[in-house]
Amino acid sequence: MIYMKKLMICSLLAASAAISAEAQNTGRSPLRVGVKAGGNLSMASFSADGYSDVKNKFGFGFYGGGLLEISGPAGSKWKGQVEALFNYHNFKNEYAIANQPFKAVDYKTDLMQISVPVMVKYFIIPQLSVNAGASVNFNLASKTKFTNPATDEAMTRDNKDLDMLSTLQVGALAGATYYIYKGFFVDARYNYYFGSVFKNDNDAPTYRLSAIQLGLGYKF
């Protein structure tokens, strides 16, 4: 643990020295900050034994937050980027319990999440980059609305209060960024989240989340 801390401190010092040297040599800062926002198209793939008539459906949400872009040496086509985003996901699952007389029920779930993506960007041309990386995602809250098939009563389940929500998920991402004019850009990205949104202890169902993001941003 001590070795890891020393390694992290040395890495940060080395990165700071490299950034400072780049700024002095070129007269420009390799760092740029920005903001971005847009829409999420999310789906959670439901899988479990003992269920039938399973249908997974997309739902619309949104995201917004800030970014820090780190440039390489002058003339390099590679850049790095770190973001901090608030995600609001919406997804729908329809299924019935096998061998039961009740019809399939539509479950509508929302999920609030803080996401920290870290990625590398390669510029094919000065206006267009392709991006890939990973993310750490903190699930904050979630509720599911459905109709009880036995009583036809509308119900809302608080997944966090019931200790069903997985609090941490790691993800992978890939996408592209196109710069429209000066600091303005449009961004498209596919996100996949490993593990289940909800805890699947004791053979509980698995919900594997993925999302397509499309939005606008500005780099200062």
Image (spheres, grey):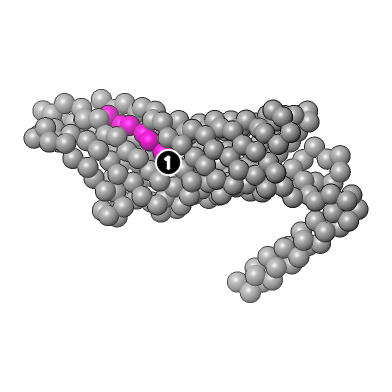
| Quadrant hosting residue 127 | top right
| Quadrant hosting residue 88 | top left
Residue furthest left as drawn? 151
Helix, strand or loop at mark 1: strand
Disc 1 marks a residue whose amino acid type is Tyr
Camera-side residue of 214 and 94 = 214
Kindly report the secondary structure that dominates the magenta region of the rendered protein: strand
Residue 152 higher or lower than 67, as above or below: above
Residue furthest bottom as drawn? 2
Side of 70 where 137 appears, left or right: left
Is 90 part of what is drawn in magenta?
A: yes
Camera-side residue of 49 and 72 = 72
Name the residue: 28% across, 41% down: 144
Side of 176 where 212 appears, left or right: left
Name the residue: 31% across, 31% down: 93
Residue 174 x %, y %: 60, 35
Residue 220 higher or lower than 53, as above or below: below
Residue 208 x %, y %: 41, 38
Asked whether residue 210 is in view, the answer is no
Asked whether residue 160 is in view, the answer is yes
Side of 29 where 88 appears, left or right: left
Side of 176 where 170 appears, left or right: left
| Quadrant hosting residue 36 | top right
Q: In which quarter of the image is the C terminus?
A: top right
Quick one: label 1, few (<14), some, or many (20+) residues within 10 Å? many
Name the residue: 68% across, 65% down: 8
The segment highlighted magenta reads 88-94
Residue 170 x %, y %: 51, 48
Residue 137 higher or lower than 177, as above or below: below
Residue occupied by mark 1: 88
Residue furthest right as drawn? 25
